[in-house]
Amino acid sequence: MATKQNGVLATFTPTVSKYTNETLPANGNTVAATGYNIYTCPGATLMSGKLYISNNTGGALDIDVGIVEQSDVIQLDAATSQPGSPQNYTSFVLSSGQQTGYTTSIVIDYASLSGTFVVGEQISWTNSNRSPSAQTAILHYHDTTNGRLWLRNMSHPLGLDLPGDTTFTGAGGATCAVGPSHAGTGGTQGWSGLVRYFDPLNGTIYFLNREFRNNLNYANIYDVNNENRELGNNNVERSLSKYWRPVTTTQTRYAAAGNTTPATEFIDNNGVELLVSGVSQATTEQLIVNGLQVADNSVKEISGILLGTYQSLYVKSTGAVTFTLVGLEEQAEIPS
């Protein structure tokens, strides 16, 4: 179990603090965010603290502060726009809050299937556009009717931007092909991660994006021995090495016939392709401060912040106020 941290746990300045990801170009590999989950309470941990907001920008600015449990809020399109045109979202199945409760929008349309792919096995291929060229993913769902492999845990998010004909091989020996010699084949630059909660009343996925990092690496979230990125109480490293590739309502599909940007679709447990209409970072009911004005040359203090396991502190402003979280982590009991 990770060493507990204390003191300054996170700092963030909207429009100044930056994050990166592996799809950004080398000559512009950072994004200055206006909102971010600056801290996530690790597994088997309780955090109590205060949030300080300092404004010396020359004018008053509004702030939002929330306690959230996701990196991305994914809103599905109207129920009647989903496959089968149901009247509501209750027929869709996504596992919530489980270590194996994944969903993904990463999919390849393949040809020349040989053998039987097994859900959960590693899929391997070679892509000379990437370094290293050896690429892997985990098979999440196999749509044998339409010839589609839904993948998660990509070794590189651009792994399906292929240079030519490519063979995908399962750990059990099955193969399929994608490339210009196979009409209709291609693959998407999508997202995968865990479902913190699927709200079937509103059609909302509270998503733990595998490509998100604050003090925790969300690729390892729920693994208390490996999720913490910083164990030496080094807040500079913890706060300044942000990583995120936000989910968007469209995603690039790579194909020899030409790249396109179709609407993003996530797959449910039964193979239903769920159409996305919107993405945000927090919902209104998750905000504990909504549009609070902070005057110039002033400091606001929000005390009594208490976070349980995998709850996050979200902050946002349109200007360069500085958020500083000062707190103490303590061990908490977790279900056996």
Image: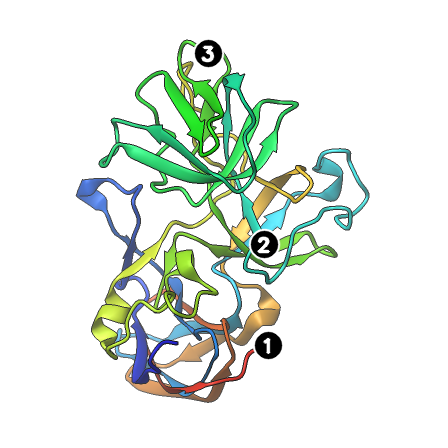
Residue 223 image position (x, y, % from top left): 44, 65
Is 168 on the left-hand or right-hand side of 269? left
Tell me how far mark 2 sits from mark 1, CA to CA. Answer: 17 Å
> Label 2 is placed on what type of residue?
Gly
Mark 2 or 1, nearer chain start = 2
Number of labelled discs?
3
Q: Residue at x 28, y 84 (%)?
A: 297
Q: Is residue 123 above or below residue 326?
A: above
Q: Which circle, 1 or 3, is nearer the viewer?
A: 1
- The residue labelled by disc 3 is 182
Of 60 and 164, nearer the camera is 164
The residue shown at (57%, 71%) is 286
Q: Residue furthest bottom?
A: 304
SS state under label 1: loop
Query: What whole-number distance in Å separates the C-alpha atoms at marks 2 and 3?
Result: 33 Å
The residue closer to the viewer here, 43 or 163, is 43
2 vs 1, front mark? 1
Residue 258 marker: none
Circle 1 residue: 335
Q: Position of residue 155 (x, y in %)?
A: 35, 42
Q: Which residue is mark 2?
A: 101
Which residue appears farthest toward the left when viewing the image?
A: 27
Residue at 37% x, 61% y is 217
The residue lying toward the viewer, choosing from 203 and 43, is 43
The tag earlier along the polypeptide, 2 or 3, is: 2
Quadrant (top left/top right/bottom left/bottom right) for the N terminus: bottom left
Q: CA distance from mark 1 to mark 3?
A: 50 Å
Spot occupied by residue 95 in the image (x, y as percentages of width and height) = 64, 55
Mark 3 Cα-neighbour bin, 10 Å: few <14, some 14–19, many ≥20 = some
Neighbor class of circle 1 (other Cα within 10 Å; few <14, some 14-19, many 20+) is: few
Q: Do the CB atoms of the residues marked 1 and 3 lie less than 8 Å apart?
A: no
Residue 117 at x, y = what percent? 54, 30
